[in-house]
Image (tube, helix red, strand yellow):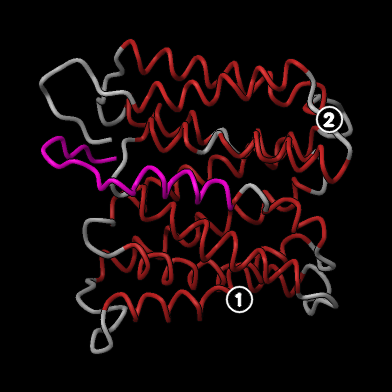
Amino acid sequence: MIDRPAKAAPRFAFPAMLTGSAMLAFGPWMVRLADVPPITSAFWRLALAIIPLLVLARIVAGSNAAVTQGLDRRTVAAIALAGVFFAGDLAVWHLGILRTTMANATLLSNAASFLLPIWGFTVLRQRPGRRALIAIALAFIGTLLLVGQSAEMSAEHVIGDLFCLAAAIFYTGYLIVVDRVRGRIAALPLLALSTTAGALALLPLALSSGPIWPGNWTPLLMLAIGSQVIGQGLVVYAVGHLRPLVVGLSLLIQPAISATVGALRFGEIPGALAITGAALVVAALILVRLPERTSRPHRD
């Protein structure tokens, strides 16, 4: 991601990232409740969100401005690529959600929390300081403790686990492309157009995977509005203003929420290790937000 040290992040960027990540945490539950195949639920998540996102993008841009106004071919191609990455993420993640535990699905798909900062450190030469390394270590240990016994790696779940890891790779690619084009297009138009591209990419897969029309629209509507419109909308907005480390660590609140859902909905009561893990994740989030002891301003 592009570092812009001379420009401070808006005050709402970090809260938006946390809120968006929290909304996304309820996605696996809705996928399990849906009465269509997993790839089909991925398609409907995007398809049902297109019109609300286009309307919101038009409102934000102004009644006389088109969503695609000022876009060149390079930007359009990048947005289409982001949509394809996101379609791949949802397709393999939804397959994984039904083949492994909810804890594994959330944890492994959020490997982007570590892949994204690694991208910033290695490719973009954003060298981590001691505080950043401590935050990553706390977040990593906390996440492992958080899932505890629910995140067992077994032969029965290994295929689902691999699907979820593949989803993390796709999602990392999506976030990288999103960051590259955020300077050329506002968040809502970007999300609306990439969502449309992703839905078009998923449509052939959905048509070939089984029944496409659901009997119960509620889980799919909650996926579309809660996860795609609100959750992804806030994440896309925040990604343009925050460092890869902050974005990656913010994604780690999802396992904490999934553990809570598991406890309330499926009777998966967290033990002492899981509670300790959640505390470590929170500590990592707080640590990475503390001001650096240097006169050089940071993008955070």
Residue under the image location 23 percent in, 41 percent down: 2
Above or below residue 129? Residue 115 is: below
In the image, 76 versus 291, the foreground residue is: 291
Above or below residue 16? Residue 57 is: below
Cα separation, mark 2 vs mark 1, equals: 34 Å
Residue 157 lies, in percent from the top left, at 83, 34
- Give the numbered dot on residue 48: 1
Q: Is residue 22 magenta?
A: yes
* Residue density around tag 2, few if under 14, some if 14–19, many if 20 or more, within 10 Å: some
What amino acid is labelled 1 in the image?
Leu
Residue under the image location 26 percent in, 65 percent down: 185
Residue 257 lies, in percent from the top left, at 66, 40
In the image, 270 versus 174, the foreground residue is: 270
Residue 294 lies, in percent from the top left, at 15, 17
Q: From the viewer's perspective, is the residue at label 2 or at label 1 nearer?
A: 2
Q: Look at the numbered disc 1 and give the secondary structure of its residue.
A: helix
Above or below residue 217? Residue 278 is: above
Q: Quadrant of the N terminus?
A: top left
Residue under the image location 68 percent in, 18 percent down: 145
Residue under the image location 68 percent in, 71 percent down: 221
The answer to whether marks 2 and 1 mark residues whose Cβ atoms lie closer than 8 Å is no
Which residue in the structure is indicated by mark 2? 269
- Give the magenta part as a residue range: 1-23
Examine the image and state in which quarter residue 262 appears. Answer: top right
Q: Quadrant of the C terminus?
A: top left
Q: Is residue 13 magenta?
A: yes
| Left or right of residue 24: residue 93 | right
